[in-house]
Amino acid sequence: MLDARGAAVPAVIHWGADLGPLTDAQLEVLADSRVRVVGPSAADAPIRLGLVPLLSDGWTGLPGLEGATLALSRVEPGISVHLEGDGLSLVVELKLDDHGVLHTRSTLTNLGTEPYALAGLATVLPLPAVAQERLDFSGVWAAEREPQRAPIQHGTWLRESRHGRGGHDDSYLTIAGTPGFGFRHGEVWALHLGWSGDKRTWIDRSAVGLGAIAAGELLAPGEVRLEQGEAYASPWAFAAWSGAGLDGLSSRFHGMFRGLPAHPTGPRPLTLNTWEAVYFEQDLPRLSELAELAAGVGVERFVLDDGWMTGRTDDRRALGDWTVDPARWPDGLGALIDRVRAAGMQFGLWVEPEMVSLDSALAREHPEWVLGSARSWRHQFVLDLANDAAREHVRDALLALLDAYPIEYLKWDMNRDQLGGSVHGQVLATYRLMDELRAAHPGLEIESCSSGGGRIDAGVLSRTQRVWPSDTNDAHDRQSIMRYTSLLVPLEYLGAHVGPAPAHTTGRSHSLSFRLATALFGHAGIEWDLSAATTEELASLRVWAHRYTEMRGLLHRGDLVRGDDLGDPVITGVVSADRSEAVFAIVCLQTPRESVRLTRRLPGLDPAREYQVSVVDVGAPPATYAGIQPAWVADGITLTGAVLGAVGLEPPLLKPDEALVVRLVAVG
């Protein structure tokens, strides 16, 4: 609800629960009731948080735009708010989609005769007084999206990313809510910036009682300098409210992502990636054997990872030389692709278009295209795609591959931070490159990988069909990573692979049953040298692959729900839109603190319907402690949604790092 009366910058006076139909007179009364009183030792007129908070209007928190005085020009349907002042024109767009997500961005135009150096332009929305607790995320490589919660107190909680990408410590989604909010309870307000570069997110609470949640691109000094008539458009920001906890936010955001034009429409193919199977040791016989084994267990997409380019024998050379290595592939990739496709699988290829090795033909021929940071990272540098000639060179090289071979999928990696050059220009050029490739090959799918989960946002997801949440396939760590990545992004985007034991990243070993159950809840895949797998393991993978293809329609279109019961086990489930079926994972991550596992409630079901509950065979049974297990595990059970949601099920005596998957089907 926007108050655009008068000449001041309009203010959002409410975003949250639906207030029902209101007459014009009632709207006037509501708007008047939101005018704050004037406190002691304060400005003589009430201070309100404008749509673009300004110091000149009395807002002493972080401003939406620095160093300007603006006034309302007009409001156009749509909604588009036009502001002017100090030789500037600012247009703020606001769109509310069918899922209850507010899309907003601002466009600033320099109307003056002198250049204007933009310091920053942010989306700022008010927070009500009841929002007293905040949640955002941090992390490191292979341990992304670690939640961190704290009370909201006076002052500014500011997060800034200077990675040239979101980074592994990306704040990702900024949330404020009522004290103690959880997955299924509490009132919460959230903001996400759809931008793949540097950014700022913050929560402000002033001593005079005003609160704000905000996000915007983080610009380097002088990075955006507008000449007369030039304009800057901020990234889109996405805001959502829920009166039913974090799951309510997920429902809204998932609906938004599923409505994107780039959202994948078909079933998400079971994928095998070759990286942890062969690393750089690529040859046709070995990869042909891997492809044959993959097809045998039910893989539908085979992805050749790093190491296929000319001279790329390790990570120190050949990035930027996007030609097939004649030494390893004397006949090109055609022989491997023919075998992959003959086995009924799609073929995908790893690329890293934004990067270059100093030991490469490209860097030797065009050293001016290498961004000038003296610090290498993973022995590589950033290629200046903001230089049109560099972007066009990479585009043409990749198009040559896509034209020559039936490549349906690119795993697009970005394995380092950008520490020099214009991040703003680089991100826009990367977006343009992705758009150019998909325009030339409309059926092409792209996965966004950034040394794992370093770049996951609505900006890149508006042009990609998959993201890689983390470089770790350790099932224990993946449980948390997937749980919190899926707060924003639906499961069909989130690559989740079964790996061998021990896990390559952590060295820890987990049971095959736990690895299979964990990878089921996502866009499932395999990252494993299947030639080293036993006959029994291959048989288990075949069962699991069948379960995935059988259940992916539910997993990738249903509503994600998570249990709020404290402690272990953890409950994650997907319930169909009509509430006729569901699948839940009962996950134990710790040694039990009681002699039996705690009863767990299954949320999101229709309380009036009866459900038949049965255990899903994912290919291997979970390990349990000795003792009498609940009878329903073997025989199944029929209970109402009301009972399952309010009382729940007593889980079996699962050992730590084990999961039981159950399926529910409505009776009648």
Image: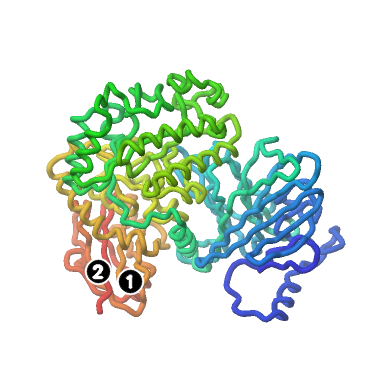
The three-letter amino acid code for the residue at tag 1 is Leu
User: 183 and 32: which one is in front?
Assistant: 32
For marks 1 and 2, the one nearer the N-term is 2
Question: Number of labelled discs?
Answer: 2
Q: What separation in Å lies between label 1 and label 2 (alpha carbons)?
A: 10 Å
The residue located at (32%, 41%) in the rendering is 407
Q: In this rendering, would 148 be left or right of 83? A: left
For the rendered model, the colour scheme is rainbow
Question: Residue 410: x and y, percent?
Answer: 37, 41
Q: In this rendering, would 342 be left or right of 434? A: left
The residue located at (26%, 62%) in the rendering is 662
Residue 506 lies, with reference to residue 651, above or below; the image says above
Question: Residue 230: x and y, percent?
Answer: 70, 44
What element does badge 2 sit on? strand
Q: Quadrant of residue 241?
A: bottom right
Quarter in which the C terminus is drawn: bottom left
What element does badge 1 sit on? helix
User: 617 and 625: which one is in front?
Assistant: 617
Residue 644 is labelled as 1
Q: Quadrant of residue 283?
A: top left
Residue 613 is labelled as 2
Q: Quadrant of residue 368?
A: top right
| Tag 1 and tag 2, C-beta contact below 8 Å | yes
Mark yes or no: residue 536 visible. Answer: yes
Mark yes or no: residue 146 visible. Answer: no
Question: Residue 534: x and y, percent?
Answer: 14, 40
Question: Residue 53: x and y, percent?
Answer: 73, 55
Using a 10 Å C-alpha cutoff, classify the residue at mark 2 as few (fewer than 14 neighbours), some (14 to 19) or many (20 or more): many
Using a 10 Å C-alpha cutoff, classify the residue at mark 1 as few (fewer than 14 neighbours), some (14 to 19) or many (20 or more): many
The three-letter amino acid code for the residue at tag 2 is Val
